[in-house]
Amino acid sequence: MMHWVETYHLTGILTGLMTFLIIGLFHPLVIKGEYYFGTKCWWVFALLGIAGIFGSLYSYENGLVSASCGVFAFSSFWSIGELFEQKKRVKKGWFPKREKDEKSSHE
């Protein structure tokens, strides 16, 4: 497959597509992560970022995979900051706040 990608010079286009998809994946992950877990889940994004760095380093022979792992890593790291920004957006009322005690609302 990679030979075909390189023959038709599609590496840049596919890297851009992967970047678009990865960033698109992290947007709802940050929103849902903050909604369900608050900012306590920041370490999950940190671990994902570290895993992405290792993935990028160990896939150096395949430029597309290495670049995608790098984009994944730094999107994970960026999401840590976005998680705390999301908390501020919730306080401003831009996003819904999760009620912690949902049992009392059903009684």
Image (cartoon, rainbow, N blue to C red):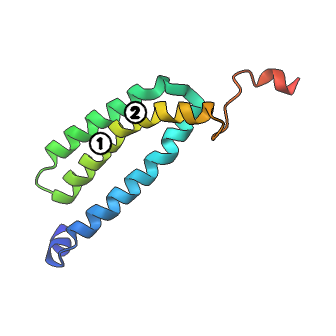
Q: Of the residues shown, which amino acid type is indicated by label 2? A: Ile
Question: Who's the residue at 48% across and 47% down the image?
Answer: 27
Question: Who's the residue at 29% across and 41% down the image?
Answer: 73
Q: Secondary structure at mark 2?
A: helix
**Residue position for label 1:** 74
Q: Of the residues shown, which amino acid type is indicated by label 1? A: Phe
Percent across and percent down for residue 103 are 79, 22
Question: Who's the residue at 82% across and 20% down the image?
Answer: 104
Q: Secondary structure at mark 1?
A: helix
Give the answer, above or below, for where 39 lies relative to 77.
above
Percent across and percent down for residue 32 are 56, 39
Q: Examine the rendering and report whether any part of residue 1 can be seen.
A: no
**Residue position for label 2:** 80
In the rendered view of the protein, which quadrant contains the N terminus? bottom left
The image quarter in which residue 45 lies: top left
* Crowd tier of the residue under label 1, counting other residues whose Cα lies within 10 Å: few below 14, some 14–19, many 20 or above: some
* Crowd tier of the residue under label 2, counting other residues whose Cα lies within 10 Å: few below 14, some 14–19, many 20 or above: many
- Residue furthest to the left in view is 61
Q: Mark 2 or 1 closer to N-term?
A: 1
Percent across and percent down for residue 82 are 44, 37
Percent across and percent down for residue 40 are 48, 22
User: Taking 89 as reference, is 51 left or right?
Assistant: left
Give the answer, above or below, for where 1 lies relative to 58.
below
Could you tell me how far apart the alpha carbons at marks 2 and 1 are, in whole angstroms?
10 Å
In the rendered view of the protein, which quadrant contains the C terminus? top right
Give the answer, above or below, for where 16 lies relative to 87.
below
